[in-house]
Image (cartoon, rainbow, N blue to C red):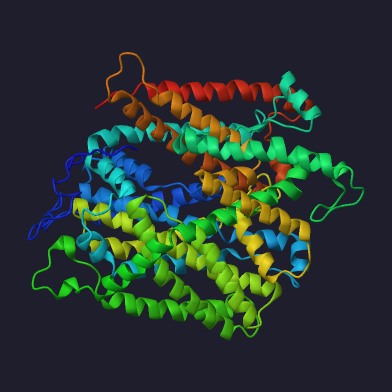
Amino acid sequence: MTHESKDTIAGLPANARRPLEPGERYVPVVPDEHVLEVTGRSVTLGLVLCAVFAVSAAYVALKLGQGIEAAIPIAILGIGYSGLVRRRSTMLENVFVQSIGANSSHVVSGAVFTIPALYMLAAEAGATAEAGGGVAEPAVWQVIVVSFLGGCLGILFLIPLRHHFMVEMHGKFPWPEATATTEIVLSGERAGGQARVLALAAGLGALYDGLVLTLHAMAEQINFRVLWIGQFMERHFLKFSLLNNAAVVGVGYIIGLRYAAIICAGSFLASWLLVPMVYAIGKHVPVALPPGPIPIGEMGIDDVFKHYVRIIGVGGIAGAGLLGILQSLPAMIRSIGANLKGLRSRDERARAAVPRTDRTLPGATTGLGVVLFAVCAVAFFTFGLGIPHAAGFALAGTVLVVAIAFLFAPVSARAIAIVGTNPVSGMTMLTLIVTGLVMKKLGLTGGDGMFVTMMVGGVVCTALAAAGALASDLKVGHWIGATPAKQLALKFVGTLVAAVFCGLAMWLLAKQGDGFGSRDIPAPQASAMKTILVGIFGTADQPLQWLLFGLGAVFAVVLRVAGVPALAFALGMYLPMEINTPVLLGGVLSWVVQRRRKGDPAEAPAARHQQGILIASGLIAGGALMGVLNAGLNVGFGTPAMDRLHVLADPAFEGRVGEGIAIVLLAGLCWLVVRQAGRARPS
């Protein structure tokens, strides 16, 4: 989204985005003392949307390795609901709906980038054997506890920094995500109309992906075998395939053409260069080359990609994350200083008269909260992981969690304030390395070492994601005039709801198909975390695997030097082509919608793009919910019962006719997105 260069944004005071002059005070949009903020409506609606978007965000993150930001669509839906009831919600009620609901995305980010690695290790007999001991599959309640503890810790460490980021640094950061959310909340009437568009798009996404996933009314994967190009490529050990999924197309639209093209470039390099090259060389070797189970000459395209080329992508993801840490090191040092400064800031409640918009939680909340967190964390790591004699490891893990979260929480908040993205994956990888080495030094090895290390990493990752997201929510409240104490208190409630539904969604998706790490649910970020764990605790020697992993890290360095986003490219190398190509398709749709047409007023392309983002957000929400619902139906009723729902039961019909139907309907979906986005007019 482009931001205005003027001092005002949709009704914000003139000094909202610039540093204040000496003696000048910022007065928010709603400075009144007696206003409706926390009501049954705002809390209930916020929690319902939090649950819905937690499920949606988990599905998308596990499918694509990309989190989704829930704040803007939740703000739109909250305002749209207000237009359907007799008493319209106040602006601050809508702020609280958004603030509570937005817990969904950051809790999910922390959990799904880490915990699925344990599901993968538990499912892979070879990995557990080489680790020197079995890795237990995490229980649903363990995932919920990890997510909730991490979210609470991130909130606790932002409480003493609220005054520093909101007041002392007023006007010194751009706050891109908070700016976009504030614009939506301030333009209530317009957003109410947008809610209808968002809801209809969600219904379309659910219907489309339901036809694909549940009814099998068309092919789920388009391989273009009905065309000569598909047949020609397969004869030369090449492939071109596309996942028929409305949610993934929506993600590609929001990502945009440039980023989507970089992701797909990584996929094309992997599938059209590395896979044929590995096969051309490896087919002359008559024995299996670990980690492949059979000789390369006997493998198909997907087998070569899975056992060899994908490992290069994992190395690229890890290398990009660690390079991001090195690049951010100066900012981290500045943020740690800001953290200490914020902790020394004068307690606002000590002032003679505290305005409602400056009332925060007592200064002792963080201290008492961290003590309570430490007690719960030690108890959980000691008794909740099923590891004997774990008290010492639990204490060490808790100390590491608190120390790392304390150091990196302001880094997350500052990153959100400046660029709108949070480098949690790189910081989590660093956490895993440090924690793994400490645990190994203390004598914890094998599967138990992996399990404890990943649980620590999950808490830290969620804490850092929570800290960054909370900073953005507090800025929205600061600009508009919400009471900080109420925002902070309700964040704990929203975190609990998000943790519960994220844990349930992850458990259902783990039972889908071949589980995490498969082509159905790739979970790319967690795969990189798993590789780090195996590297620290593993015992088997697989030089080829580590050579490929190192090659991926070299790719990341080269891409960084060339100025190409290394993480995006590496994700493309890791994810199967059929997942990346609909992302590119969505990016192309975004480019088409934003093109300047003859006779367009200057604001028209931006208006169309905003409408397109709403439609894409709806496709993501509806399609993702249907994906999780389909997984739940498979678990609840079993695959044989679900097979009776399939419209295309004949494999031959499923192949050619199903693919033809999929091509036609996907083209129709794309046409509908462009057409409906093109109907938007500048306000």
Is residue 424 in sight in this rendering? no
Residue sitting nearer the eye, 181 or 77: 181
Residue at the spot 39% in from the left edge and 26% down from the top edge = 594
In x, y percent, where is residue 175?
30, 50
Q: Is residue 244 above or below residue 354?
A: above
Determine whether, in the image, residue 573 is placed left or right of residue 400: right
In x, y percent, where is residue 531?
66, 60
Residue at the spot 20% in from the left edge and 74% down from the top edge = 347
Residue sitting nearer the eye, 542 or 619: 542
Q: Is residue 610 above or below residue 335?
A: above
Res 116 → quadrant: bottom right
Determine whether, in the image, residue 117 is placed left or right of residue 202: right
Is residue 674 in sight in this rendering? yes
Question: Quarter holding the C terminus?
Answer: top left
Residue sitting nearer the eye, 667 or 141: 667
Residue at the spot 61% in from the left edge and 49% down from the top edge = 555
Question: Quarter holding the N terminus?
Answer: top left
Determine whether, in the image, residue 471 is placed left or right of residue 236: left
Which residue is farthest top?
A: 598
Q: In this view, does 557 lie above or below 204?
A: below
In x, y percent, where is residue 607?
32, 28
How many badges with numbers are in the image?
0
Q: Is residue 390 above or below residue 587?
A: below
Which residue is farthest front?
A: 561
In x, y percent, where is residue 170?
21, 57
Determine whether, in the image, residue 14 is placed left or right of residue 377: left
